[in-house]
Image (spheres, rainbow, N blue to C red):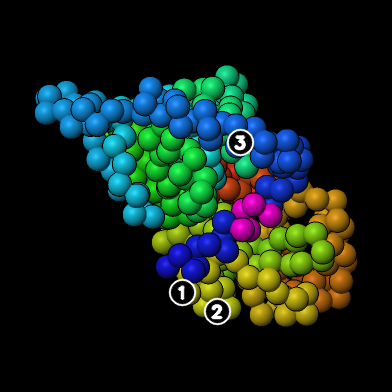
Amino acid sequence: MRLTKQPVAVFCVIFLMGTMLLACGNSEEQEAGNAAATNAGNSAAVSAAPSAEASGSTSDTASTRTYTDYRGHTVEIPVSPERVIYSGETYGDLLALGVQAVGYPTSMGEGQVFEDRLQGVEDVGFPINLEKTLELQPDLIIYAGTDEADFEALSKIAPTIILDTFAPLQERMLEIGGILGKTKEAEAWLAQYKTSEEAMWAQLKASGMKPGETAAVFTYYPGDRLFVMAATGLSQVLYSENGFKATPGIQKLLDEGTGFREVSMEVIGEYAGDRIFILTPVADEAKQSTEKLMQSKVWQSLPAVKNGLVYTQDIMKTSSDATTREWLLGEIPRLLDPSAE
């Protein structure tokens, strides 16, 4: 299963790269700081992490519990964490549950639909800065990476778990809800989301969406690299039970659990659907590739193009987190029928 998910992590980093350059540009200076923080973390571990006595408490109001993350780490974590550092994708999941982290790589939130909700959140950098993390005195660190060295270093600062941020929305929300002591809130959010999603598809069908219509999502990355999207981002909303159907080529990718695949312009017709969604990239070079595609004879020959059923959306606003997914339920009808606004 992880073989299909790991490339998605690389893909998300690729498309967030335009917003992360400033953070990554400090990596050399940060390495020195990280090393110092690791040493500091060793001495601070006793005060920053729950003690063995606390974790073994038999009180009716125990402050910690045992948790095993998907990578197999068993950790004593707070029952109700109050100072969370979150390093990874899908930060909007926390916001959907009414939780604000004390630390997060804020460059990852630039351009996202929740960007204006990051006030007061300290930037822990990307890659995560251990010294800054230690300074914030977290009682829980949620980390989306897979580097065991990073995990070990972070664990010296506070209880640390690795979260699968590429799990399906429902699975992920229930997991994060349980970790944060917000299970009821997660269940309520999922129920509300399902109701809103069903209402959106009913609205679209009432306004002309035909049964069995197919859709495809494409985007470019610098280097003239064209990708067709499958089990990630906007596609996760479009290919829901009541939504658009995937074309045979994309359905094969979905059946494999593939998040995306690089394709050539010449074979785009093998994936294109009745409707096409183009995700506007961050980098100028990729934007130029998109314009070149849309002027090509191959593109102009596609039925969706001829029928005027092509839609564009900023790629940074098509993430998989809960807050963005909820926002897209209102955005998709506006994309398909601007006159309905």
In the picture, the quarter occupied by the C terminus is top right
- Inspect the magenta stretch and tell me whether residue 12 lies in it: yes
Image spot of residue 181 (x, y percent): 30, 32
Q: Amino acid at mark 2?
A: Pro
- Looking at the image, residue 87 lies above or below residue 44: below
Residue 172 in percent (x, y) is at: 39, 48
Q: Give the quarter of the image for residue 8.
A: bottom right
Picture quadrant where residue 233 is located: bottom right
Rate crowding at label 3 as few (under 14), some (14 to 19) or many (20 or more) other CA atoms within 10 Å.
many
- Taking the magenta stretch, the answer to whether it contains residue 179 is no
Q: CA distance from mark 3 to mark 1?
A: 41 Å
Q: Which mark is residue 34?
A: 3
- Which region shows up in magenta? 10-14
Q: Specify the label residue 255 is tagged with.
A: 1
Amino acid type assigned to the residue bearing label 1 in the image: Asp
Q: Are marks 3 and 1 in contact (CB under 8 Å)?
A: no
Q: Residues within 10 Å of mark 1 (few under 14, many from 20)?
A: few
Q: Which residue is mark 2?
A: 248
Q: Count residues near mark 2 (Cα–Cα under 10 Å), then give few for <14, some for 14-19, many for 20+.
A: some
Q: CA distance from mark 2 to mark 3?
A: 47 Å
User: In this orientation, which residue lies closer to the viewer: 105 or 96?
Assistant: 105
Q: Residue at x 38, y 55 (%)?
A: 71
